[in-house]
Amino acid sequence: MGIPLKPVLAALGALPWDPPPRGAVSCAILSDGIRDLGLAPPSASAFRDAAAACGDAERGAVLLQVLAFALSRTPLGASLAQHRPTWRDTEKRLLSALASMKGLPVEQVPRNGFRREEVLRKFLHAFELPIDGESPAESATRLGAVDFRRLKAAMDREEVERRRVAEAWAKRKAEEAAAAPSRTGSYE
């Protein structure tokens, strides 16, 4: 049995996000949740490194806030406690999870279910935690489907192609217009 993602996302979506815990408070909540699992929590410097890995301290603070909320106020913490993870490289995994979120528009996370799902899926992926009702391949496919950087890159490629087609069409129309006989003239 894996982590029940749907109830965690539902609970996370129902949380009041204002004012969000930031910085040291989010780190303390995460540390408590990790300690409750019987694991050594990351050091303060590891939290700073993790926040920096995802782009900047503010972005990292928001992402740490989401993870802290997920551990403390949703079924995620209890579910993790049932799994009793045995990994000892918590700092490395947290750094990997947040680094994978670089470029994520964090201002969308509190209001957007897809962005919250992306954060949680990347966290679960970095910690090698299975998702209830999904095979590893299904989890990887869904992670790819909600990955903001991948989606943005696809949209950017489509925009470039759309512009290329529009420019080619405009050029062809201009060439056709230039080649067409003139319809202006005098009637005598």
Image (cartoon, rainbow, N blue to C red):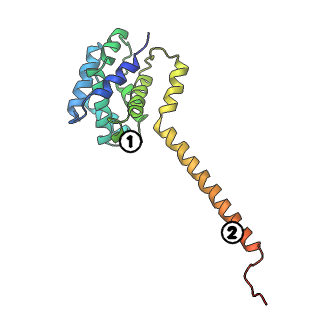
Give the camera-side residue of 6 and 149: 6
At 45% from the left edge and 17% from the top edge, which residue is drawn? 131
- Circle 1 sits in a helix, a strand or a loop, which is it? loop
Q: Is residue 48 above or below residue 6?
A: below
Residue at image coords 50%, 17%:
134
Please name the amino acid that badge 1 sits on: Pro
Whether residue 35 is visible to the viewer of this picture, yes or no, is yes
Q: Residue at x 43, y 18 (%)?
A: 129
Q: Earlier in the sequence, mark 1 or mark 2?
A: 1
- Residue drawn at (43%, 28%) of the image: 122
In the depicted structure, whether residue 155 falls above or below residue 178: above
* Quadrant of the image occupied by residue 109: top left
Return the x and y of residue 70 as percentages of the image width and height. Answer: 31, 24
Residue 32 picture quarter: top left
Using residue 49 as the reference point, say whether residue 100 is left or right of it: right
The residue singled out by tag 2 in the image is 174
x, y (%) of residue 175? 72, 69
The residue at which mark 1 appears reads as 105
Q: Is residue 170 above or below residue 28?
A: below
Q: Amino acid at mark 2?
A: Ala
Please say if the residues under marks 1 and 2 sit with CB atoms less than 8 Å apart. Answer: no
Residue 7, image x and y in percent? 36, 19
